[in-house]
Image (cartoon, rainbow, N blue to C red):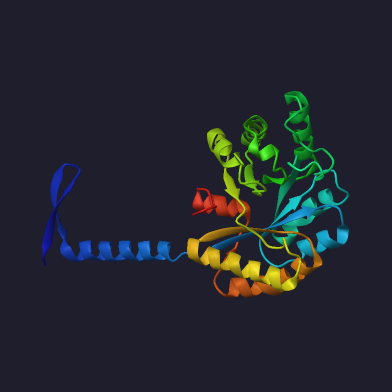
């Protein structure tokens, strides 16, 4: 039998060559498995809480989806309490101020003109309203997410509560990623809006684009809304997506498995 001399613990030892070849072979197999890990798709349904029917339809969608619940709405608590029974993850969809004055984010909106005490009271009231939240996303927020001081306040609270931040990316000027990283807060961001155009053909195309991006890059984050057209198409397409080798995962699972920002990867 052939042997190879190797240093181990500062000693020269003889190791049978077949054992070395076996170790190299299995190491290459392990690398191959890692490289061929299934692509992952995060689908978030925003704006849940105002209507029971659409909330129940979102809960009934197949697969591990993330539901973004609006605080201070009639059905958000009820949905949060049911979510785990339907394999859904719950996050707070925090109302934040938009650049356009005509866009109203709703009750309890966070703004950059609020003093720190009132801002934190409002944000913690939002968080406390929704049971079992795993993270936070911004509802609107094109004005607020571009401001460092209010985003720093938010990230400090998320760090203390061990929550992640999902940036809906309603503005290209968002500083959320940078501020999250500075505060050690897990972060990901939206790559696709599925239903900016609420027509079946357009939504279907966006779903296909999100799946294609996940296959190419390994993961993608897509956001939809509880429109009948969106919910109907997702109910049809989600089983097919998983059958074709793409894993539907919660936002938190994407963070845990990748341990890095998802957008632009």
Residue 188 x/y as whole percent: 58, 48
Count of marks overlaid on the render: 0
Instruction: Say which of 202 and 8 sits in front.
Output: 202
Residue 245 x/y as whole percent: 54, 71
Q: In this rendering, does residue 132 appear at all?
A: no
Residue 258 x/y as whole percent: 50, 52
Q: Is residue 219 above or below residue 133?
A: below
Q: Could you tell me which residue is drawn at 78 percent across and 44 percent down?
A: 130
Q: Quadrant of residue 92?
A: top right
Judged left or right of residue 197, residue 207 is left
Residue 207 x/y as whole percent: 64, 67
Q: Could you tell me which residue is drawn at 60 percent across and 71 percent down?
A: 242
Q: Is residue 39 above or below residue 124?
A: below
Q: Quadrant of residue 89?
A: bottom right
Instruction: Say which of 232 and 196 sits in front.
Output: 196
Q: Is residue 66 above or below residue 158?
A: below
Q: Quadrant of residue 18?
A: bottom left
Q: Could you tell me which residue is drawn at 86 percent across and 47 percent down?
A: 73
Judged left or right of residue 96, residue 243 is left
Tell me the quadrant of the picture where the N terminus can be found: bottom left
Q: In this rendering, does residue 242 appear at all?
A: yes
Instruction: Say which of 196 and 181 sits in front.
Output: 196
Judged left or right of residue 125, residue 91 is left
């Amino acid at each position: 039998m052939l042997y190879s001399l190797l240093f181990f613990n500062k000693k020269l030892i003889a190791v049978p060559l077949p054992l070395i070849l076996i170790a190299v072979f299995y190491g290459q197999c392990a690398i191959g498995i890692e490289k061929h890990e299934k692509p992952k798709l995060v689908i978030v349904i925003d704006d849940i809480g105002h209507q029971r029917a659409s909330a129940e339809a979102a809960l009934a969608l197949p697969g591990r989806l993330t539901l973004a619940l609006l605080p201070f709405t009639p059905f958000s608590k009820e949905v949060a309490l049911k979510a785990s029974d339907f394999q859904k993850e719950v996050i707070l969809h925090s109302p934040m101020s938009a650049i356009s004055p005509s866009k109203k984010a709703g009750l309890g909106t966070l703004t950059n003109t609020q003093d720190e005490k009132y801002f934190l009271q409002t944000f913690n009231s939002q968080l406390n309203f929704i049971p079992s939240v795993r993270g936070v996303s911004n509802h609107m927020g094109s004005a607020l997410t571009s401001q460092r001081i209010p985003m720093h306040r938010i990230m400090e609270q998320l760090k203390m509560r061990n929550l992640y931040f999902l940036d809906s990316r309603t503005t290209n000027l968002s500083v959320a990623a940078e501020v999250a990283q500075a505060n050690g807060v897990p972060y990901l961001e939206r790559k696709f809006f599925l239903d900016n155009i609420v027509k079946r053909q357009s939504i279907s195309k966006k779903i296909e684009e999100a799946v294609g991006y996940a296959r190419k890059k390994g993961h993608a984050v897509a956001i939809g809304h509880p429109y009948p057209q969106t919910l109907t198409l997702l109910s049809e397409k989600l089983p097919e997506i998983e059958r074709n080798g793409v894993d539907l995962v919660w936002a938190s699972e994407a963070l845990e498995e990748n341990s890095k920002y998802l957008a632009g990867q």
